[in-house]
Image: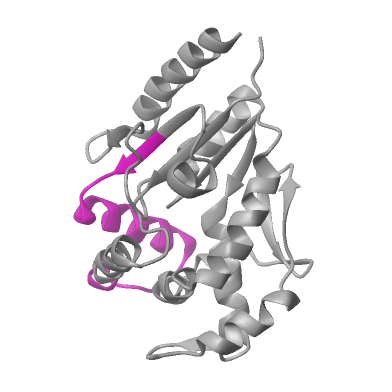
Amino acid sequence: MNNNITIAVDGFSSTGKSTVAKLIAKKYNFIYVDTGAMYRAVTLFAKQNNFVGKGFLEETKIISSLKDISLSFKFNEKLGFAEMYLNNVNVEKEIRTLEISQLVSKVAAISEVRKKLVSEQQEMGKKGGVIMDGRDIGTVVFPNADLKLFMTASAEKRAKRRYKELIDRGDKISYEDILLNVKERDRIDSTRDDSPLIKADDAIEFDNSNMGIEEQFKEICTLIDNKLKEIK
C-alpha cells in the first residue's frame, strides 16, 4: 500500500497538534515536521540577538539575519521524535518556554520569515509520506495535501493543557498568564496579513475540547486508512 501521502494538521495553539501528529507519524512511518518549532527557533535566534523582546520588534534586523539561520530536525531515538536544531545546536527545550511563546506570533507574522520557512517546509514534504503541523499547512504550504485536519478547542481548555505541561516540566508560571498568552496568540495568528490562521475549505475540523488524545488518534487513523485505500 502506498503511504506517500501528505497530511496537513492546522489549528490553534495548544490544541495537541504535535502530540497527535507524532503518534500518527510513528504508526504509519511518516516523516513528522513541527513547523511551529521552526518559527520558535527563529524567534529564539532573534531574542538571543536582541531583535525581539517584550514591547519591541526589530523587523529589519530579523529579516537581514535570516541568511545566518540554519534549521534542522534530528531524530532522538530515546524520545521517539525529532528535535529542533538552530545552527547545529539543540534548542528543543529553549524554544518551549512561555517567553518564546509570547514572542513567536510577532516573528511569525513577518512575511520574509514565512517565505523562508514555507520554502523549507515544502522541500521537506515534496516526496510525500509526511505529516506536518502548523497554522498554514493546508492553505499555503501544502494546499493540495491528501488529508487536511483543523484542530480547535476552547481557549480555557488549551490554557489548562499548556499550564499542566509547563508545571510538570518545572516552570513557575500562572494559569492566568498562560490563558492571556493563548488568547493573544489566537488574535495575532488569525488577523495577520500574511497567511493568517484559517480553516481550509476541504479540512476536517476536530474540536477536541472534550476529547482525549487516544480518541483523536483513533478517529484520525480511520481517516488516514480510508485515504490510503482510496489511492492504493
Q: Position of residue 91 (x, y in %)?
A: 66, 67
Quadrant into which the N terminus falls: top right
Q: Quadrant of residue 47?
A: bottom right
Q: Position of residue 80 (x, y in %)?
A: 66, 40
Query: Which residue does the image show at 63% across and 64% down from the upper left?
Result: 116
Q: Quadrant of residue 217?
A: top left
Q: Position of residue 168 (x, y in %)?
A: 43, 58
Give the number of callouts: 0
Q: Quadrant of residue 101?
A: bottom left
- Most foreground residue, 116 or 20: 116
- The correct choice, above or below, for 99 with respect to 122 in the image is below
Please tell me whether the stretch drawn in magenta is mainly helix, strand or loop: helix
Query: Which residue does the image show at 36% across and 67% down from the upper left?
Result: 193
Quadrant into which the C terminus falls: top right
Instruction: Please give the range of residues in magenta.
Output: 149-177
- The correct choice, above or below, for 222 with respect to 138 in the image is above
Q: Position of residue 56 (x, y in %)?
A: 42, 91
- Most foreground residue, 11 or 85: 11
Q: Is residue 80 visible?
A: no
Q: Residue furthest right?
A: 88
**What colouring does the structure picture have?**
one colour
Was residue 222 drawn as part of the magenta stretch in this picture?
no
Q: Is residue 138 visible?
A: yes
Query: Which residue does the image show at 37% across and 91% down from the upper left?
Result: 55
